Amino acid sequence: MWKDYSKSYIKNNRASSISIMAAAFVATMFLSLLCSIAYNFWAYDVEQIILEEGDWQGRIVCETLSSDNLLSLICQFANVEKAVVGEELSQKEEIVADVYFKNARTIYRDMPLIATQLGLNEDSIQYNSLLLSRYFIHDPEDEAPPMLLALYVVILIIMSVSLILIIRGSFELSMNARIHQFGIFSSIGATPRQIRTCLLQEAMVLSILPMLIGSMFGILISYGVIKAVNFFAADVSGRHEAVFQYRPSIFAATVFISFLTVIFSAWIPARKLSKMTPLEAIRNTSGLLLKKKKHSRFLSCIFGMKGELAGNALKAQKKHLRISTLSLLLSFLGFSIMICFTTLADISTRYTYFERYQDVWDIMITLKDTEISDFDLTDELQDISKIKDATVYQKAEAMTFLPEGLQSDELSSLGGLEAVAGTPKADGQFQVSAPIVVLDDTSFLDFCLQIGITPNLDGAIVLNQIWDSINSNFRYKEYVPFVMEDNQKTALYKNGKTIEIPVLSYTQTVPTLREEYDNYALVHFIPLTMWNKTFGEVCEAESDSYIRILSNGTANLADLNNLEQEIAQLVSEQYEIESENRVQERLSNDRLIQGMVMIFGFFCVLLAIIGIANVFSNTLGFLCQRKREFAQYMSIGLTPQEMRKMFCIEAFVIAGKPLLITLPLTILFVQFAVTASHLDPMAFWSEAPLLPILIFAAAIVLFVSLAYYIGGKRLLQCDLNEALRNDTFI
């Protein structure tokens, strides 16, 4: 009986069935998309860590054993899969062994035991903690372990709960329309368990195919997202291309979670319906419960009686429209804030990077693991006709002590280094960072001429400026002199060693380099000759050197690409390099922002689809229940044209409410972001992304109106007088 009844109901109530199938499809698609993208992002992160740090799990450093003996002893442990010597890190006196475990989850317990058996202390062992954390293996002594797994589980739970509420609405609409019928079944002996079983069986029959199709669509969309990320981030340096990955276990987990979601969504209203007594169910009118005491003053003032009726109908549907309202609100708010944020980021990057350094560099070459003293192609670079200027430089770190009395008068008037930079004083002096920039000799001599001093390779030029953080912000910085300029020598120290060098000049002009200097540091520019002669035993430079090149042309993309290829061909024969040019960097940045807008916008669109689908579900699902409502209106003289106006008012409220709430919230966010970034408000409002926001809002209004148009057309085509009669079984 129940099987035949379910088949007959599904066949004769296609609108309700389609609503449930659509909800199951959307829910499963979102779950599949979430699981697939999360897995691919995790796999990409693991690949990036392995490329940068290696795939080793544990590492042992030993100075007392030979490599063969060390590996043999390590492999005697049952949980060790293999051990290999790290050739790049090992030295004659020191052997570094990379250890791989069969069960890496016990690594934090096994590694100390291995070290003890080898006669080593715990300082001799290392863990690839970042890689292990991606497999959710954490140091038990770490008080704040990474929360990646917990975050993913929380997101998945929130997503599932949200989708349960969405699907539940569709099931509840279908089941509420049949309360009278199930009341009759209950009166002739149907048990609550039989009613629940019947409804759950219907839910699974309607949901199995949409769940499978939704899972496949989620996989396809995630594949498209990975391809889009690769396309828009193709020119990002240091990034490897992401490869779409998927496993059957991910598909099984998606379908299982979707199955639980659908079952739970159907079980909630089914349980509620089955607990009603036969008398309560039979007496149910199957219509909207319009409450006479609640009035819609705003709508009635604007639209009169039709506004009052529409407001009452919306209040009766309030519970069922919560998800659609929330989805539309979050999608529009998320899209508005996202696109405003990316516009702000683009303006900020343009002001602080591209426009600031556009006359400083055209091409940057990074010489990987190369000392500036080992680079011998400076003259060859200068001979290239398309190059206007080329500077080879390297950076190093040092410190200096600044007696309180050497602070400039301007800095002292601001309260001194303690007030401006928060640097503590010890024994009447401050410890100040003193970064070193080593320039090739030709560039250093040119810098001497630039600041108006006699060219000399026997001394340093000190950047004598400090950010006035009291009277200016980070966006529009103002500087004051750092130290008194009567000191002809400066003392630098590093690693317990001190060196004293002459100061050729103090300046507030910097060389034409694409560098951002510390706000509270005394930067020292020195020539390569002095570095080789004086600093070799005191300071250790960074591993990479750099070549800053300014072209001798119009700096369009084609010319810079040709020049970059010519330089790379010259330099890459002897050195490992990375290169970039300014125009391509700008285009890549624009493409990244465009990609970010498209990807996040896509998710906002999907969120809006949930809300719109819920509106369609409510509109079409309430069709049977609203027949009685509109038949009553017609009996008191309401015309079909006036009922159409009621539908228009309802659509206006449903679509307009999220838009009206979003507008002030977006303005507040923009105001906060502009203030926090210290940008001129007019700089943003002159480029405000109003058109995309208006298009997104218009799309929401259009689809909500379409839902009510379809529902209203179907309703008015029915025989509304027939709706006043008693319900039939089907």
Image (spheres, grey):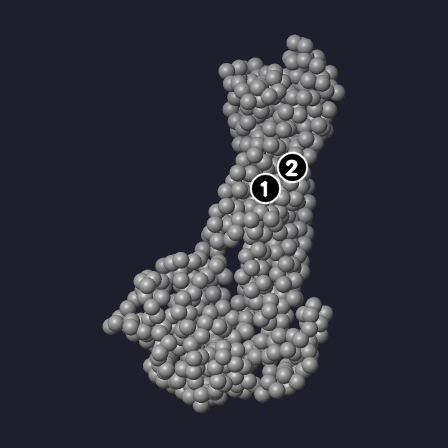
Counting from the top left corner in percent of width and height, residue 161 is at: 52, 40
Residue extending furthest bottom? Answer: 533
Q: Tell me whether the residue at label 1 lies in contact with that at label 2, contact meaning CB atoms closer than 8 angstroms.
A: yes
Q: Which of 431 and 275 is in front in this view?
A: 431
Element type where label 2 sits in the image:
helix
Mark 2: few/some/many CA within 10 Å (<14, 14-19, 20+): many
Task: Give the mark, 1 or 2, whose residue is nearer the N terminus.
Answer: 1
Q: Nearer the viewer, residue 581 or 711?
A: 581
Residue at which label 2 appears: 700
Residue found at x 37% / y 61%: 142
Counting from the top left corner in percent of width and height, residue 494 is at: 37, 80
Residue found at x 33% / y 68%: 409
Counting from the top left corner in percent of width and height, residue 100 is at: 49, 72
Residue 397 visible here: no
Real-space Cα distance between discs 1 and 2? 10 Å
Residue 505 visible here: yes
Residue found at x 36% / y 66%: 410
Quadrant occupied by the N terminus: top right
Mark 1: few/some/many CA within 10 Å (<14, 14-19, 20+): many
Element type where label 1 sits in the image:
helix
Q: Which of 218 and 377 is in front in this view?
A: 377
**Where on the picture, by quarter, is residue 64?**
bottom left
- Give, as a three-letter code, the residue at label 1: Ser
Residue found at x 64% / y 78%: 388
Q: Nearer the viewer, residue 114 or 666?
A: 666
Residue at which label 1 appears: 331
Is residue 160 depicted above or below 491 in this figure? above
Residue extending furthest right? Answer: 717
